[in-house]
Structure formats: C-alpha cells, structure tokens
Image (spheres, rainbow, N blue to C red):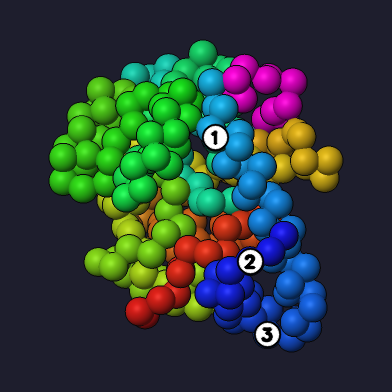
Amino acid sequence: MRWFPPARRRFDREAKRVFPGVKRSARAKLGQKMGMQMGRTLFEIYHDAEFQTQHHKFNASGPGLVALKEAQAAGKGAIIVSGHFGQWEAVRAVIKMQGLESGAVYRPNKNRHYERRIFAGIEAGGKPILATGRVGTKALVRHLRGGGIISILLDEKYSEGVRIPFLGYDALTSLSAAQLALKYDLPMIPAYGIRTEDGNAFNVDFEAPIPHTDSITMTHAFNDSLSARIMVDPEQWYWMLRRWDAV
C-alpha cells in the first residue's frame, strides 16, 4: 500500500510515540497492516446491510452482553463504548442478533459523497444515528431515557475534553458517555469486534460494565480497556486520529 507522505509521517509519529523501541521498518509494516484492516472495515461499513446478516461471522462472548440483556429486560437503556478498533459495526451486528437494536453517535463528514455512503452504511446497522452537537445530544438523551441502546466511539480527540491517559499519554477525552451513564443510571459497557487472523470473522467481546464511580474514573477505565486491546492487536486500531494533538 502506498501512502501520501503527510499520512505516512502522521502514522509514524503516533506509532513511534507508543512503540519508541520499534524499528522504523517494523512500524512501516504495522502501518501496512493497519491500512489493510481499515480498508476491509470501510468496505464492510459501506455494505453494512449485508454485513449485518452474516451471523456466521460473529462469535459473541463476555459478561457485558448479559448485562445488556438484563438492562433491556428491565426497560432501561444502555451505553456501548468502543473505538476505531477491529470492526466496530460487528458489535451492533451482534446486538441485532439478540433481537435488540443499537443506535450510534456519528460525526458528520465534510465530503458529501463519502458522507452519503458512510451514513447509509451506519444507519443499516441500527437506528437512530445521531450527529454530534447540541441537537444530537438532546435526541440522544431522549433515546436513552426511553430505554434505547446507543453505541459511542470514544477514541477521538475531544477539544473540550479532559486529559486522561491513553496508551500511556494524556489525550483529550470526552466524559459524555460516563456522565450519561451516571445521570440516568445506565450500564456503560466496553465492547469490541476483533477481527480474526483470517480477516473474515470476528470475536465480539462485551466486557463487564464499568463500575459507577465518577465520570473521570469511568472514562479512565475505558481508555485503559481500549489501550489494552490495542497493545495486543495494534494493527486493528486506526492510528490516524491525531489522538494526542494539542494536549
């Protein structure tokens, strides 16, 4: 895979930050693997309506799935937290396999052609799809208070966030998921769709809900959870998010 020089430099900067002792050639190989993973992920999201029906590809496990079902049986909503790791839409596919549905929080893209395709794909995975911002937040609260499930990717830089360690370095992180979980007494469940070695199947792991304490401690726990996953399978995380910029 060929990279534009700015993208290559950005990836190398971030990978070197986390893996300072790794040789440049090894970082380049990691970048190639990441590119292949993300290419597959994007293709699957573009065709999410079909992807969601391929139940044989998803192996679900973990105590969080039980907690999710219990919350729904009690008429409560739930917050699924994940990152740009593996195939995050596999998480919502498994939720749909349980006869449930998860909406998602989504950051609109300025490229209208990409926006149209990616939005349609995400919407096929479950509704509602709520844009970031004030209007989307109000709709999100209504959805959760009505017993709905929402999935949020928490690994993007949030300029108004709090500095919380991520992969060993402070990163501006949104507290919104934890704040909502605390305010409305909802489980906050880390979940990951980990691509298997052959690339065509997924181990979807729902971790135990993060204990309710305070929003910073809970968000720190999520960052630690995702960091641990990335350290095991670094090629499955999208390293191009500028996660530590302007900290």
Which kind of residue does numbered mark 1 sit on? Ile
Instruction: Nearest to the eye among marks 3 and 1: give it.
Output: 1
Q: Which of 177 and 88 is in front in this view?
A: 88
Residue 232 percent coordinates (x, y)? 73, 60
Of labels 2 and 3, the one closer to you: 2
Query: Element type at marker 2?
Result: loop
Badge 1 density bin: few <14, some 14–19, many ≥20, Cα 10 Å: many
Q: Position of residue 146 (x, y in %)?
A: 25, 23
Residue 42 visible in image: yes
What type is the residue that disc 3 sits on? Pro
Q: Residue 20 carries which label?
A: 3
Residue sitting nearer the eye, 84 or 79: 84
Q: Position of residue 147 (x, y in %)?
A: 31, 23
Residue that appears at 56% across and 17% down: 98
Going by the numbered disc 2, the residue's amino acid type is Trp
User: In the picture, which quadrant includes the N terminus?
Assistant: bottom right
Res. 228 image quadrant: bottom right
Reading the image, the residue beneath label 2 is: 3
The CA distance from mark 2 to mark 3 is 21 Å
- Provide the residue designation for mark 1: 45
Above or below: residue 227 compared with residue 62: below
